[in-house]
Amino acid sequence: MPSIFTRIINREIPGHIVAENEDFIAFLDINPLVLGHTLVVPKVEVDYIFDLEDELLSKLHLFSKAVARAIEATITCERVGVAVVGLEVPHTHVHLVPLNSMDDINFTRPKLNPTQEDLAKTATAIAANFNS
């Protein structure tokens, strides 16, 4: 059964996409830690990040860097934090989280519940600042 991320990649379910190329897609987390919290996902469905082929793993980080720059250009933050947890969805993904404090990347705190309109506006703004 395809992961929820594969279903977004295949456009079977909606996602607020901020960037995409032939190997990766980046979209907003629908229950973010902070507005602008973005997931970067390889299009190939591999559960564990360290099971990715070396070249794809390298490209994942470079694509994530470009997405992080777009987030920084859009969301007021000191920097973009990076986390790879990998337990919630069996499909490799990198969390990019706009940070103004360490608490902004605390995964144990309650998540936000932004409106679809807020997510759409944020995704459009980040996408406009994305340069691959």
Image (cartoon, rainbow, N blue to C red):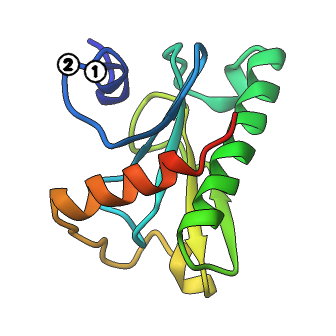
Question: Badge 2: few (under 14), some or many (20 or more) residues near its Cα, within 10 Å?
Answer: few
Residue sitting at 69 percent across and 81 percent down? 78
Residue farthest front in this picture: 128
Which part of the image, by quadrant, shows the N terminus? Answer: top left
* Residue type, numbered disc 1: Arg
- Pick the residue in front: 86 or 43: 43
Asked if 10 appears above or below 82 in the picture, the reply is above
Asked if 61 appears above or below 33 in the picture, the reply is above
Residue sitting at 46 percent across and 69 percent down? 107
67 sits left or right of 26 in the view: right
For disc 2, the marked residue is: 12
11 sits left or right of 39 in the view: left
Question: Badge 1: few (under 14), some or many (20 or more) residues near its Cα, within 10 Å?
Answer: some
Q: Quadrant of residue 80?
A: bottom right
Residue sitting at 49 percent across and 45 percent down? 127
Q: Earlier in the sequence, mark 1 or mark 2?
A: 1
Mark 2: secondary structure: loop
Contact flag, marks 1 and 2 (Cβ < 8 Å): yes
For disc 1, the marked residue is: 7
Asked if 90 appears above or below 77 in the picture, the reply is above
Numbered badge on residue 60: none
- Pick the residue in front: 91 or 55: 55
Asked if 101 appears above or below 20 in the picture, the reply is below
